[in-house]
Every structure is written in C-alpha cells, then in structure tokens.
Image (cartoon, grey):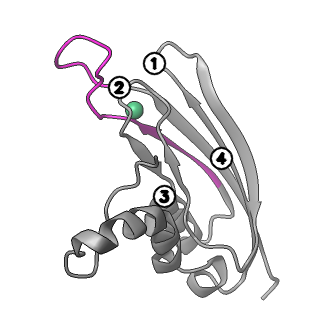
Amino acid sequence: MAFYRKKRRKAGPSKNDEKVLRAQTAVDNERAAGTLSTRFPTLRSLRVKVSIATPQGVILEESEETYGPNDPFFLEADCPGSCGSGSYDFAVLIAQSLETLQKRGAAQIICSEPSYSGAAGTVCGCIAKCEFTAETAPS
Ligand SMILES: [Zn+2]
C-alpha cells in the first residue's frame, strides 16, 4: 500500500471505482505531474540521489535514479519511518532550483507526521536528503 497524498481533481469516486482508483493513484499522480520535457524543455536528464535516515542517523533507504525527458516529473518518496504515512515531495524543491537555472542542488525534508511507535505527541522526524544533477541541452 502506497501513501501518496491525495491530489484529487475529479469529483468523488463511486464505491465501485474506489478500489481501481486507489491502485491507480500513483499512476494518476505521475500523469498529472507531467514529464521532465513538458516541465523543462531543455532538460536531458536528471539524476536524483535520495537517502532517508531516522533522527538517530540510521539510514533506512537509499536510492539513486536517473530520469529521462519522457519520464514523469514525479519525485516523491514514501517515508519508511515510524509514521507509516509520511511522504517526501522533492519535485517542488527541484523544480524551484531548475527554474532559477541551477543544475545541481540538494534538499532536505524532515517528516513531521506523528509517530505511532513513540510517545503521544512525538513526530516521526525522519530526514530525507536529496541531491540532484541536471543535464540540459546547450542553448
Ligand atoms: Zn515519517
């Protein structure tokens, strides 16, 4: 089960559609996000390195992926931490850098979802670090 934030644009689904809709939520979000080339026409590739660690510094997840011009501009990771419902959206941060013509950069997002394994009132606090490098076509 994925924990993508709901980004509904349509009216509420019927009961029959809900199951199918849930399975397709990720796909729908990717389509709605557009592709790298529709968002940034000069972009040839985007390399994104993500590592997610607990507040204590234990790495829970590491990944590195390269996206091409036709890949969806959808860079969201589920939080593997104790919240069970957090997610990190790097697309906004990366888009901001690309819009200001920065070809590389780093972002850090801290999960602020409530933690259900800790005491009441504690937050998950996992830290996702993201590094990206963009290749653009010469203009
Ligand atoms: Zn979390």
Near mark 2 (Cα within 10 A), the count class, few <14, some 14-19 or many ≥20, is many
Q: Position of residue 33 (x, y in %)?
A: 49, 75
Q: What element carries label 3?
A: helix
| Prevailing secondary structure of the magenta residues | loop
In the picture of the structure, the residue carrying the numbered disc 1 is 55
Quarter of the image with the C terminus is bottom right
- Magenta-tinted stretch: 105-123
The correct choice, above or below, for 107 with respect to 92 in the image is above
> How far is disc 3 from disc 1 in space, using C-alphas?
21 Å
Picture residue at 28% right of the left edge, 79% below the top: 9
In the picture of the structure, the residue carrying the numbered disc 4 is 131
**Mark 2 C-beta closer than 8 Å to ligand 1:** yes
**Mark 4 C-beta closer than 8 Å to ligand 1:** no
In the picture of the structure, the residue carrying the numbered disc 3 is 93
In the picture of the structure, the residue carrying the numbered disc 2 is 124
Q: Which amino acid does label 4 sit on?
A: Glu
Q: Does 112 appear in magenta?
A: yes
Q: What element carries label 1?
A: loop
